[in-house]
Image (cartoon, rainbow, N blue to C red):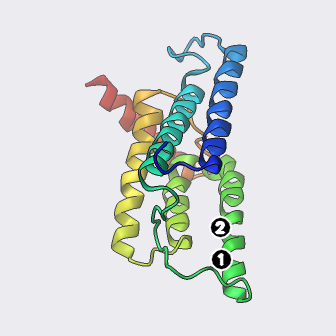
Amino acid sequence: MGRLTRTHVIEAVIFLLVVVIFYAFSFEFNQPIEIYRFGATAWPRVVIGLLLIATLGNIWFQYKNGSAAQGTIGQSDDEADFSEPGTILRMFAVLLTPFLFAWLLKPVGIYFSAPFFIAAIIWLFGERRWKAILVMTFVIYVLFIGLFLVILNAPLPQGNTSPFYDFSAWVLTMNAKLQGL
C-alpha cells in the first residue's frame, strides 16, 4: 500500500465515513426551493464533494510520500514552543477569529467581512508578505464569490448595517448584471 500506515488508513476511513454520513443526511432536507433552482441540498453537497476531494488528495499524497511534511504557509522546521506567550496568543487568535467572523455576519455580512477574515487567517498562520496576503485573499475571495453567487446562486448573509448592507447590495447587483449578459 505504498507508504500508507495503519494511521493513514484509519484517518481516511473516518473522513470517508463522514462524507458518506453527511451525504446520506442531505436527503432529509432535499426540497425544491422556488427561488433557487438547485434545491436545498446543492451547496451542502458541494461542500461534501470538496471534503471528498480533499480526503482523496490526502490519501494520494500519503500513498506517495508517507508522513512527509506537506508544507504550509509560514511553516518552519522548528516545533511550536508553547512556553512563549506569543505562541499561545497566536493560537488563541486563530481559534477566536472564526467566531468573531461568525458573530459579525449578521451586522456586517459576508461580502464585506470575508476578505478581512481570509487575510487575517493567512497572516495568523504565519505569512508576512503583504503582497502574497493580498493576492491570495483576492484569489480566494473571487473563488468563494464565484462558487456561491455564480455557480450555486446561494444566498449569503448581507448584513443589516449601512454601509456594509450597501456594499452587499452592490455585489448582488453586479452579480445580477453579470448573469444577465
Contact between labelled residues 1 and 2, with CB atoms less than 8 Å apart: yes
Under circle 2, the secondary element is helix
Viewed as shown, does residue 125 lie left or right of 73?
Answer: right
Q: Residue at x 41, y 50 (%)?
A: 64
The residue under label 1 is which amino acid type? Arg
Where is residue 10? Give x, y as percent. 66, 43
Which residue is farthest bottom? Answer: 84
The residue under label 2 is which amino acid type? Val
Image quadrant for the C terminus? top left
Q: From what the image shows, is residue 108 above or below residue 82?
A: above
Where is residue 74? Give x, y as percent. 47, 74
Viewed as shown, does residue 94 lie left or right of 137?
Answer: right
Alpha carbon of mark 2 to alpha carbon of mark 1: how far?
6 Å
Which residue is farthest front? Answer: 1
Under circle 1, the secondary element is helix
Q: Residue at x 65, y 77 (%)?
A: 90
Q: Of residues 91 and 54, which is closer to you in this image?
A: 54
Which residue, given by chain and number where applicable, does mark 2 sit on? Answer: 94
Q: Of residues 117 and 180, which is closer to you in this image?
A: 117
- Crowd rating for badge 2 (residues with CA inside 10 Å; few <14, some 14–19, many 20+): some
The answer to whether residue 22 is visible is: yes
Which residue, given by chain and number where applicable, does mark 1 sit on? Answer: 90
The answer to whether residue 163 is visible is: no
Where is residue 156? Give x, y as percent. 57, 37
Q: Residue at x 50, y 47 (%)?
A: 58
Q: From what the image shows, is residue 127 above or below residue 138?
A: below
Where is residue 137? Give x, y as percent. 42, 59
- Crowd rating for badge 1 (residues with CA inside 10 Å; few <14, some 14–19, many 20+): some
